[in-house]
Amino acid sequence: MKKLTVNENLLLLPGALLSVAAESAFDIEVEHGLLWITVENDECDYWLGAGQRMRVPAQRHVVLEAQREHSHVHLLPGASTGPVVAGCLPLHAVLVATN
């Protein structure tokens, strides 16, 4: 698991997984691509597309996976400004989408 300590700009290839955690809250922002996100102690999975952002609470383990194409992702420690948008997807929808 990667400890998040500074601003990170990442390029994830399709199917690539990244496991991150941070002491304080941080934002995940997708510049390009589609990202699947699961957060420790959260019953939802999330999908973020280009231009969308999601805030992750402090002290949470997060797994990110690029879907279909490469994804340019920004991990921004601290509470950034701007809209925070993410769609919660029920587990059964995730299972149907992957089968």
Image (cartoon, helix red, strand yellow):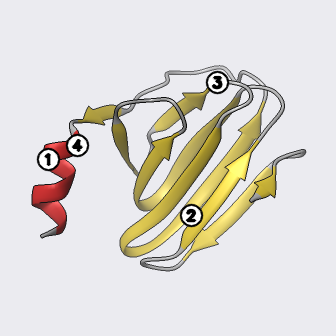
How crowded pointer 4 is (Cα within 10 Å; few <14, some 14-19, many 20+) is rated as few
The mark closer to the camera, 2 or 1, is 1
Mark 1 → mark 4, Cα distance in angstroms: 5 Å
Mark 3 → mark 2, Cα distance in angstroms: 21 Å
Please name the residue that numbered disc 2 is placed on: 72
Q: Quadrant of the N terminus?
A: bottom right
Secondary structure beneath dot 2 equals strand
Secondary structure beneath dot 1 equals helix
Q: Amino acid at mark 2?
A: His
Please name the residue that numbered disc 4 is placed on: 91
Q: Amino acid at mark 1?
A: Ala
The mark closer to the camera, 3 or 2, is 3
N-terminal of the two: label 3 or label 2?
3
Please name the residue that numbered disc 3 is placed on: 57
Q: Residue at x 22, y 43 (%)?
A: 91
Q: Position of residue 24 (x, y in %)?
A: 80, 26
N-terminal of the two: label 3 or label 1?
3
Query: CB of mark 1 within 8 Å of CB of mark 4?
Result: yes
Q: Position of residue 15 (x, y in %)?
A: 43, 77
Secondary structure beneath dot 4 equals helix
- Which label is found at residue 93? 1
